[in-house]
Image: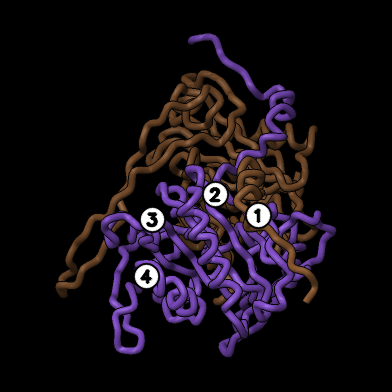
Chain colours: A brown, B purple
Amino acid sequence: MRVLLTNDDGIFSKGIEALYEALNAVHEVFVVAPETEQSAVGHAITFLDPLRVKPVKRNGRFFGHACSGTPADCVKLAVRELVKPLPDVVVSGINLGANVGINVLYSGTVSAATEGALLGLPAVAVSIDSFQPTDFRAAADIVMQVVDAIGANGLPPGVSLNINVPNMHPEGIRGVRVTHQGELRLQESYDRRVDPRNREYYWLTSQLVGTEENLDADARALNEGFISITPIQHDLTAHGMLAELRAWGLEREYERR
Amino acid sequence: MRVLLTNDDGIFSKGIEALYEALNAVHEVFVVAPETEQSAVGHAITFLDPLRVKPVKRNGRFFGHACSGTPADCVKLAVRELVKPLPDVVVSGINLGANVGINVLYSGTVSAATEGALLGLPAVAVSIDSFQPTDFRAAADIVMQVVDAIGANGLPPGVSLNINVPNMHPEGIRGVRVTHQGELRLQESYDRRVDPRNREYYWLTSQLVGTEENLDADARALNEGFISITPIQHDLTAHGMLAELRAWGLEREYERR
């Protein structure tokens, strides 16, 4: 298959290299990834500034294109301009740090996959539950399986898959669960500091807040040693709220005036 | 009520000024908004850089705080640090340009409201269907009504309201519809150019693609001259895909090794 590979930690990260090695052994891989780390950019796209693209080598060979934009920009630009004919699947990762619960919303990694789905391509995001991972094999292995499964089954339009992998050797992993996005939250605060010129600034700090989660929630699967696979889409409508909101009486239609 | 007011076009935009004037006549308003335009930043947040805050005056009086971050950063910082006691409601807008269909995903305006909801506060985003709006009255008026309705009814945890208003005089508006996020897409392409130093760059261009929409889809309501109100939440799970994905046979649990 023709695989478009991107990430949000940047084209020089170890995560994308590990995934490239695994995918490139079997598939045709095109790398278009951010020049610099783009963590927590969510689904940001760039249109107030132009985008620039530079070729990047690894070990003396062409590796891919570094793009000045966000992960979503990379996918858009790759699909619209750089990769022809179109790729068969978009893969984003391996991200350092889990993208479960509320983190899904902030994640550049997941947004790259969502962007692929919006452009009509099946797409996969993959993250490992550590900022200093020791072993990418389990993550690369599940991506290979999922890409094959997508080749066999397809994905409905607009749907992508968000995979999270425990940070352990493949032998330590307990299995694979299909999950929903859970309610894991970050407890955030700001560290207020003063710079050398005596001006205030704020750093965001955050820590995970454990919540009671269902067995099929993403963070719980991960914490119990399972690989988590969550199907993701882009409809943010609170469908359960539509009827209540209609009961508020704000809806109306004026007579033609 | 105590209202936290933000936007994504920046603290100096006309849209936030119009909303401030309307809200401030009745409520206590706290403005924390981006220093510069932050369109299409989605749910980006800032933690690789510190945030800075500056007081901003309008007409010689204190207007609010300009923040160096994104709309979601503004809401987080306001709620965690700047506005005490907590606001009763978060209002984001008036954005120049509709946030309907797929634009909801890219929108900094909507993400500010979503961030408010994540922090446990009822929240409202409001956008007008023009980049050069001529009349903010209808938008300000519906926000006042919705804020009152939230005061009376509350909003379930995690839910915010995304309001879009046609660009017309209040008398021209046909009514108000409760809608779901529709499938409106952008047809995007890149304009490839060469800079004065003969290096390539790409500008993103986009145009709306009309789609067949249900009567209760956001873009259709707007196009037919109605104000659209969509309840929004943050669960991106493709719930309809869970069963199919389980049937792929990827799920498994290994024996304890």
The three-letter amino acid code for the residue at tag 2 is Thr
Q: Which residue is mark 1?
A: A115
Callout in the foreground (4, 2):
4
Give the alpha-carbon distance from disc 4 to disc 3, as whole Å.
Answer: 14 Å
Task: Check disc 3 and report its element: helix, strand or loop.
Answer: loop
The three-letter amino acid code for the residue at tag 4 is Val
Give the alpha-carbon distance from disc 2 to disc 1, as whole Å.
Answer: 10 Å
Instruction: Answer whether residue A15 is visible to the viewer in this image.
Output: no
Q: Which residue is mark 4?
A: B31
The three-letter amino acid code for the residue at tag 1 is Glu
Quarter in which the N terminus of chain B is drawn: bottom left
* Labels 4 and 3: the sequence-earlier one: 4
Callout in the foreground (1, 4):
4
Give the alpha-carbon distance from disc 4 to disc 2, as whole Å.
Answer: 31 Å
Q: Which residue is mark 3?
A: B88
Q: Neighbour class for label 4 at 10 Å: few (<14), some, many (≥20)?
A: many
Q: Which residue is mark 2?
A: A109
Give the alpha-carbon distance from disc 1 to disc 4, as whole Å.
Answer: 32 Å
Question: Relative to the observer, which residue lies in front, A2 or B237?
Answer: B237
Question: Relative to the observer, which residue lies in front, A48 or A135?
Answer: A48
Instruction: Answer whether residue A108 is visible to the viewer in this image.
Output: yes
Tags 4 and 2 both on a single chain: no
Question: Where is residue A210 drawn, in percent x and y?
Answer: 37, 31
Parent chain of label 2: A
**Mark seen at residue B12:** none
Callout in the foreground (1, 3):
3
Tags 3 and 2 both on a single chain: no
Give the alpha-carbon distance from disc 1 to disc 3, as whole Å.
Answer: 34 Å
